[in-house]
Image: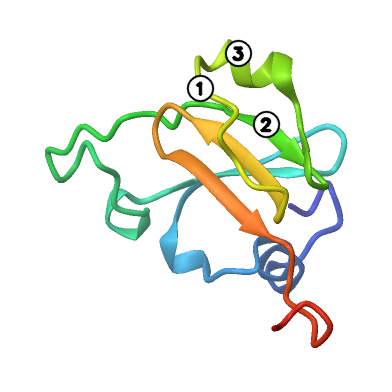
Amino acid sequence: MKKNHLDIEQVRTMLRNTLRKVRDLYLEPGGDISVKLHTKAGSVTPDMLGLNPKDEAPSILVIEDGQIKEEELRTVKKSKELTEDVLYGEWSETDGFYIQPYPQTNSQIQ
């Protein structure tokens, strides 16, 4: 640290964390720091809990500004039975359809 003209408070500021959680700290040639935390200080992972969550499938935009994107809809093997009141819609294998209707304004309310 002396060679790089750093004091402990500068390192603490760069970390935005307490040094108590740090196991190893490396000052990279470009001035960045790499940190390895003590196991107890790290975040809990699904593996630690014995869980096996599925990765999220990518979503595909199928409706944009009320316009149905027919090629994308065919790609996900879905039908065109949607309303013109939809602002935005996307499909993901994981979550299915997400539909966002146009916001209602006073002139649209009947």
Query: In the figure, residue 96 lies in which quadrant?
Result: top left
Residue 104 tag number:
none
Q: Where in the figure is residue 104, as x and y percent of width and height? A: 73, 76
Crowding near pointer 3: few (<14 within 10 Å), some, many (20+)? few
- Looking at the rendering, which quadrant does residue 47 occupy? top left
Q: From mark 3 to mark 2, how far is it between C-alphas?
A: 9 Å
Q: Mark 2 or mark 1: which comes first in sequence?
A: 2
Q: For mark 3, give the secondary structure.
A: helix
Q: Residue at x 58, y 50 (%)?
A: 99
Q: SS for tag 1?
A: loop
Residue that badge 1 annotates: 78
Query: How many marks on residues?
Result: 3
Label 2 to label 1, Cα distance in Å?
10 Å
For residue 41, side relative to residue 69 (left or right): left
Q: Amino acid at mark 1?
A: Lys
Could you give the CA–CA distance between mark 3 and mark 1, rounded to whole angstroms? Answer: 6 Å
CB atoms at circles 2 and 1 under 8 Å apart?
yes
- Residue placed farthest to the front in the image? 110
Question: Mark 2 = which residue?
Answer: 62
**Residue type for callout 3:** Arg
Earlier-in-chain disc, 3 versus 2: 2
Q: Which residue is mark 3?
A: 74
Q: Residue furthest bottom?
A: 106
Front residue of 56 and 32: 56
Q: Nearer the viewer, mark 2 or mark 1?
A: 1
